[in-house]
Image (tube, grey):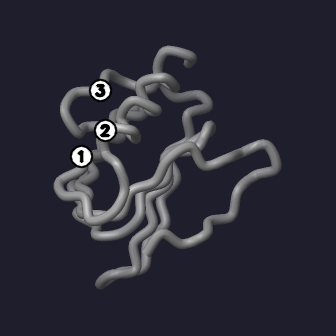
Amino acid sequence: MNRKITLQQDENVLSSLTGLFESFDGMQNVYFGDLFLTNKRIFVVSNKLINVKVSLWFEGEKVGNVGHSKLIVGEHRITVRWTYKGNLHHFMKTFQQLNVNA
């Protein structure tokens, strides 16, 4: 997949993954698609079974602790279950750096 996404003027992609993701925000959803990490948000894009685009903005939300493959932004939790393309270790380290700078 790894498609282009529309970014804000001062936003840039830091890392991306393609794989199987599980998100929880009061409801559990499983996606196969792309996960983009920018300097402002985590962006989930999936076109398998259902077309979905979900942005988890860092502004106004606390970026939570990182453990294994779970990313927590505010009330949202995304778990990377399986990676088809991309480097999960690099993605997690970049996310942790955002957490330190937040």
* Cα–Cα gap, marks 3 and 2: 12 Å
**Quadrant housing residue 96:** top left
Q: Amino acid at mark 1?
A: Thr
Q: Is residue 6 above or below residue 66?
A: below
| Mark 3 or mark 2, whichever is nearer to me | 2
Q: Tell me if mark 2 has few (under 14), some (14-19) or many (20+) residues whose alpha carbon lies within 10 angstroms of its own.
A: few
Give the residue type that dot 3 points to: Val
**Residue displayed at 31% across by 38% down:** 89
Give the residue pinned by disc 2.
Answer: 89
Residue identifier under label 1: 79
Question: Considering the image in quadrants, where does the C terminus appear?
Answer: top right
At mark 3, the secondary structure is loop
Could you tell me which residue is drawn at 42 percent across and 79 percent down? 51
| Contact flag, marks 1 and 3 (Cβ < 8 Å) | no
Q: Residue 66 shows which numbered tag?
A: 3
Question: Picture coordinates of residue 37 (x, y %)?
Answer: 50, 46
| Image side of residue 19 versus residue 95, left or right | left
Give the amino acid type for the residue marked by disc 2 in the picture: His
Which numbered disc flags the more N-terminal residue, 1 or 3? 3
Residue 36 percent coordinates (x, y): 49, 53
Residue at position x 52%, y 53% in the image: 55
80 w.r.t. 85: above or below: above
Residue located farthest toward the bottom when viewing the structure as drawn = 49
Q: CA distance from mark 1 to mark 3?
A: 10 Å
Q: Choose top left, top right, bottom left or bottom right for residue 6.
A: bottom right
Mark 1 residue element: strand
Q: Residues within 10 Å of mark 1 (few under 14, many from 20)?
A: some
- 87 left or right of 39 in image: left
